[in-house]
Image: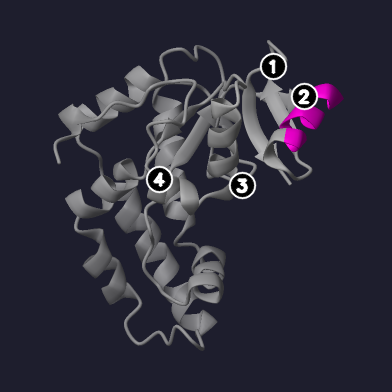
């Protein structure tokens, strides 16, 4: 697929595929709240970005070679610790196509100040917009290959390889007012805590259990 065909609209998660949404409880909740009339204050960068990064740089086989001999059911931390520096270098030297980078920059153009770059369900990293955000996106990819990242994946998924996932980018946020939490909880049928864009107090940035 050509990155020229991709677009990453702001303030919605409607472009994230059903498969991605089903695998990400927070994004699924954001999608339901958006359909229910809540405003979103974020950009959802779909998994195709990470998938393109791995494919373009032929990373799956190259990473697998670094972990040759690792038993996914009984991982040796010495193997993981020895592989981590090489994995960090490999991902750090990898790149995205210029057209895809342009698409990311365009999608983040509404944000002129600092932003938070994060995986769904995680706290994230607060950085400047523009190139700083792009570098934070690459660091999010690299985090999967730290010793802890690999151990967590093996414990939950039982496999070394990474499944591409969306990323969320939004301005610095604060806890929402109680009435907004209540309305969201009623719509979702479970208790949730919302965060909103710091400067407007209503556009959702995250949903927490």
In what element is the residue under mark 3?
loop
Q: Which residues are magenta?
A: 178-186
The residue beneath circle 1 is: 202
Residue 110 vs residue 28, the one in the foreground: 28
User: Which quarter of the figure has residue 41?
Assistant: top right
From where the camera sits, is residue 38 visible? Answer: yes
Point out residue 188 in the picture as x, y percentages from the top left corner.
Answer: 68, 40
Question: Badges 1 and 3: C-beta atoms under 8 Å apart?
Answer: no
Quarter where residue 138 is shown: top left
Secondary element type, mark 1: loop
Classify 10 Å Cα crowding around label 2: few (below 14), some (14-19), many (20 and above).
many
Q: How many neighbours does mark 1 have within 10 angstroms: few (below 14), some (14-19), or many (20 or more)?
A: some
Q: In this figure, which residue is indicated by the disc labeled 2?
A: 180
Cα gap from disc 2 to disc 3, whole angstroms: 19 Å
Residue at horizontal 24%, vertical 30%? 6
Q: Which of the two discs, 1 and 3, labels the residue nearer the N terminus? A: 3
């Amino acid at each position: 697929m050509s990155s020229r065909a991709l677009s990453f609209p702001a303030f919605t998660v409607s472009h994230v595929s059903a498969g991605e949404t089903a695998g990400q409880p927070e994004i699924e909740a954001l999608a339901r709240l958006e359909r229910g009339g809540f405003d979103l204050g974020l950009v959802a960068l779909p998994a195709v970005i990470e998938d393109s990064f791995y494919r373009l740089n032929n990373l799956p086989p190259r990473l697998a070679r670094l972990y040759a001999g690792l038993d996914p059911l009984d991982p040796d931390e010495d193997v993981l610790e020895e592989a981590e520096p090489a994995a960090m270098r490999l991902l750090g030297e990898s790149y995205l196509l210029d057209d895809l980078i342009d698409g990311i920059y365009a999608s983040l153009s509404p944000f002129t100040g600092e932003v938070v770059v994060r995986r769904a369900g995680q706290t994230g990293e607060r950085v400047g917009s523009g190139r700083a955000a792009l570098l934070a996106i690459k660091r999010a990819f690299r985090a999967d290959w730290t010793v802890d990242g690999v151990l967590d994946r093996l414990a939950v998924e039982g496999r070394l390889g990474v499944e591409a996932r969306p990323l969320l980018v939004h301005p610095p946020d604060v806890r929402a007012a109680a009435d907004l939490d209540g309305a969201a909880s009623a719509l979702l049928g479970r208790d949730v805590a919302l965060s909103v864009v710091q400067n407007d107090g209503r556009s959702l940035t995250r949903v927490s259990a």
